[in-house]
Image (cartoon, grey):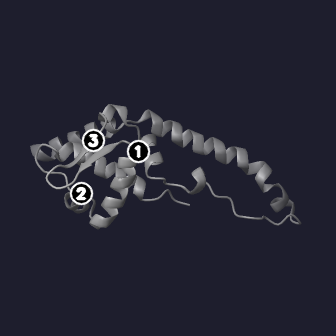
Amino acid sequence: MQISSRFTIAIHMLIAIDVLKDDFKITSDLLASSVHTNPVVIRRISEQLKAAGLIEVQRGHGGTSLKKKPKDITLLDIYKAVDCVEDGDLFRFHDEPNPLCPVGRNIHTVMDGKLIKMQEALENEMARTTLADVIKETKQLIAKEKRK
């Protein structure tokens, strides 16, 4: 199972909001162009980011801006904001393994704790990475491109 693409789209959007804010009015059309998706997708994700307190959206002439400093937004905050996995579980176990099969009877006992630990490890790594970290790396790559 994959994490929803809303997660990477949301990260892309937040980086673009910060990186492009001095040169452009940040609109759903601009973000959709950067992400290369439909503005409706951007507006849906924007609503989730707004509800999580990560962005402000000013209708009309205002545009979109970050509500928090990038150093205060973690990838875990973004992940949680856009509701990337069903029921909070990254790994969805198949329903009703066969209790008459020795593997089916024991698979939950063997795997449930391991899957929880794997999800916790991923979430801990996301919590250590801030939006500022990925913005910095993005700006370095942009600067490198300009020097070429």
Question: What residue type is disc 1 on?
Answer: Ala
- Pointer 1 with pointer 2, Cβ within 8 A: no
56 or 78: nearer the viewer: 56
- First of labels 1, 2 by sequence position: 2
Task: Using the numbered discs, state the Cα–Cα distance from disc 2 to disc 3 in whole angstroms.
Answer: 14 Å
Judging from the image, what secondary structure is the residue with disc 2 in? helix
Q: Which residue is mark 1?
A: 52
- Amino acid type at circle 3 is Leu
Q: Amino acid at mark 2?
A: Leu
Report the residue marked by disc 2.
31
At label 2, counting other C-alpha atoms closer than 10 Å, the crowd grade (few under 14, some 14-19, many 20 or more) is many
The location of residue 69, given as percent across then percent down, is 29, 33
At which x and y percent is residue 22? 12, 43
Could you classify mark 1 by the number of other residues whose Cα lies within 10 Å: few (under 14), some (14-19), or many (20 or more)?
Answer: some
Residue drawn at (35%, 42%), measured in percent from left and top?
A: 54
User: For residue 144, which quarter of the picture?
Assistant: top left
